[in-house]
């Protein structure tokens, strides 16, 4: 069964610190992996999209890495800000589904404290 | 350019009542999706559409129906609401397959008592 597992479930860090969120997936065949940010009460917003040939992708202070061999991804947040408090969702798409369906992880809830 | 909008934002239903959730996008996207989000779980696909006049079942379609009469609109219907359908519903749209970004609406919080 295609699955996406994220860790930790929740994380609290101090403003200005860095953190790394993890994502493991069993989706096969793999097409692409995305990271979304979801603020409380809002819809998810895309941060990065990576195909199997990409190892790293950055979006400002967010850097995603992908190891397609071990089926692992991480999202690194540098110099955290209070506005980074949100849920971060790892999403994987397989390459066999032409309807473009996505498989979502349950997310990591990040709280940045002053 | 409003992106993806959803109506209503909140709704409370009694068991057995019916309602329709409206999703509208102004980006001329072919693909549209309805998801539900429950605590501790990832978003799950209810139904989707790959173009005007087409619909298909997703992972959790039971108890829901959909229609895509116009390209910009995707409607989700609950014929006889049940407490198990208490959830936050998100609509999303995308231009194409494989690598295109999905844009999400702000969500509809539905409570069934």
Image (cartoon, coloured by chain):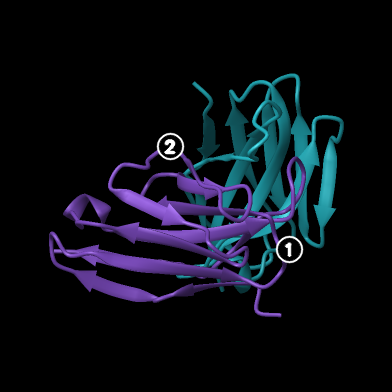
Q: Nearer the viewer, residue A81 or B67?
A: B67
Q: Residues within 10 Å of mark 2 (few under 14, many from 20)?
A: few
Q: Residue B11 falls in which quadrant of the image?
A: bottom left
Relative to A70, say whether A59 is above or below: below
Residues at marks 1 and 2, CA–CA distance in whole angstroms: 38 Å
Q: Residue B29 falls in which quadrant of the image?
A: bottom right
Identify the residue shown where x is 68% and y is 57%.
Answer: A46
Chain under callout 1: A
Identify the residue shown where x is 69% and y is 40%.
Answer: A74
Q: Residue B92 falls in which quadrant of the image?
A: bottom right
Closer to the eye: label 1 or 2: 2
From this viewpoint, is residue B48 visible? Answer: yes
Left or right of residue B112, residue B51 in this image: right
From this viewpoint, is residue B43 visible? Answer: no
Residue linked to disc 1: A79
Q: Are marks 1 and 2 in contact (CB under 8 Å)?
A: no
């Amino acid at each position: 069964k295609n699955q996406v597992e994220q860790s930790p479930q929740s994380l609290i860090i101090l403003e200005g610190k860095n953190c790394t969120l993890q994502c493991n997936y069993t989706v096969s065949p793999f097409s692409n992996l995305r990271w979304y940010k979801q603020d409380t009460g809002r819809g998810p917003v895309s941060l990065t999209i990576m195909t199997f040939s990409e190892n790293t992708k950055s979006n400002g202070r967010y850097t995603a890495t992908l190891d397609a061999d071990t089926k692992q991804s991480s999202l690194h947040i540098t110099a955290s800000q209070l506005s980074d408090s949100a849920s971060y969702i790892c999403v994987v798409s397989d390459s066999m589904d032409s309807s473009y369906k996505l498989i979502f992880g349950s997310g990591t809830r990040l709280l940045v404290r002053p | 350019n409003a992106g993806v909008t959803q109506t209503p934002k909140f709704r409370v239903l009694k068991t057995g009542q019916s309602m329709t959730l409206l999703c509208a996008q102004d980006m001329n996207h072919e693909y549209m999706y309805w998801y539900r989000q429950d605590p501790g779980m990832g978003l799950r696909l209810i139904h989707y559409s790959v173009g005007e006049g087409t619909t298909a079942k997703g992972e959790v379609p039971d108890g829901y129906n959909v229609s895509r009469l116009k390209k910009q609109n995707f409607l989700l219907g609950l014929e006889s609401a049940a407490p198990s359908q208490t959830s936050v519903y998100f609509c999303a749209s995308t231009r194409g397959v494989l690598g295109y970004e999905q844009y999400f609406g702000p969500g509809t919080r539905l409570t069934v008592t």
